Amino acid sequence: MIYSTMYLSPVGAIKLASDGSNLIGLWIEGQKYHGDTILENMVEKEDIPVFDRIKDWLDRYFAGEKPAISGLPLAPIGGEFRQGVWEILCQIPYGQVITYGDIAQKMAEKMNRSSMSSQAVGGAVGHNPISIIIPCHRVVGANGSLTGYAAGINTKIKLLELEGVEMSSLFVPKKGTAL
């Protein structure tokens, strides 16, 4: 059984999904790929302890604190490659960004390969089923482009500003597929 509940945030309504013990999904309303890793119907249920923990974490995050994710019961659904990318995302510190190319290099090292496609990494980042907590919003293009956030560029900017990211070298692209 998969359970869900809603959380109202400064960036919009957020849907949380759980298997009863772990958080398996967190999607901002209108986000691309919303719920695409959940193959069964979700049942609305608020009184699950993991939801209380996640809502408390989100309250602290949106209050400008820097809550740790290490103790949260996260169980994103995805293949080995995506899991590897999401693990790297979890290591990006608050207030900092990393490029798709940087993640590709880390994944290549992890897989004992000489190189890795940034586009493949971009696909894994874009399909992250636990937005905000697994911080895919901290990933930018090599030139500082704020592209590639499934919940939209404006939401990405709000999250980065909330975290105190130095925004002067970052920009919104004029055109692209992930706007």
Image (cartoon, rainbow, N blue to C red):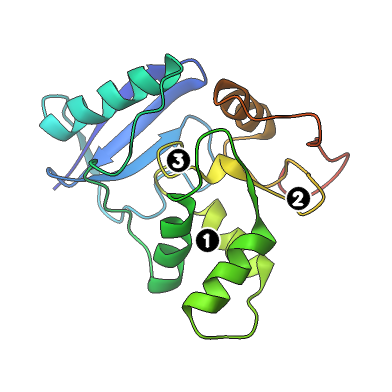
Instruction: Decide if residue 48 is on the left or right side of residue 89.
Output: left
Quick check: 158 above or below 88?
Answer: above
Callout 3 crowding tier (Cα within 10 Å): few <14, some 14–19, many ≥20: many
Measured Cα–Cα span from mark 1 to mark 2: 16 Å
Reading the image, the residue beneath label 3 is 131
Q: In the picture provided, is 139 more to the left or to the right than 37?
A: right
Disc 1 vs disc 3: Cβ atoms closer than 8 Å?
no
Q: Is mark 2 on a helix, strand or loop?
A: loop
**Mark pair 2, 3: CA separation:** 19 Å
Where disc 3 sits, the SS reads loop
- Percent position of residue 163, x then y: 55, 26
Where in the figure is residue 91, as x and y percent of width and height? 45, 50
- Relative image position of residue 140 (x, y in whole percent): 69, 47
Question: Quadrant location of residue 32?
Answer: top right
Q: In this view, does 80 lie above or below 36?
A: below
Q: Image height check: is 40 above or below 159?
A: below
Residue found at x 17% / y 47%: 19
Label 2 is placed on what type of residue? Answer: Thr
Above-or-below relation of 32 to 67: below
Sequence order check, earlier mark of 1 and 2: 1
Q: Is residue 126 left or right of residue 153?
A: left
Q: Are marks 2 and 3 in contact (CB under 8 Å)?
A: no
Q: Earlier in the sequence, mark 1 or mark 3?
A: 1
Q: Residue 177 carries which label?
A: 2
Instruction: Report the quarter where the C terminus lies.
Output: top right
Left or right: 121 in relation to 179: left
Which quadrant of the figure has residue 80? Answer: bottom left
Disc 2 versus disc 3: nearer the observer: 3
**Which amino acid, by three-letter code, is at mark 3?**
Ser
Residue at 43 percent of width and 49 percent of height? 90
Q: Report the disc number at residue 124.
A: 1
Q: Residues within 10 Å of mark 2 (few under 14, many from 20)?
A: few
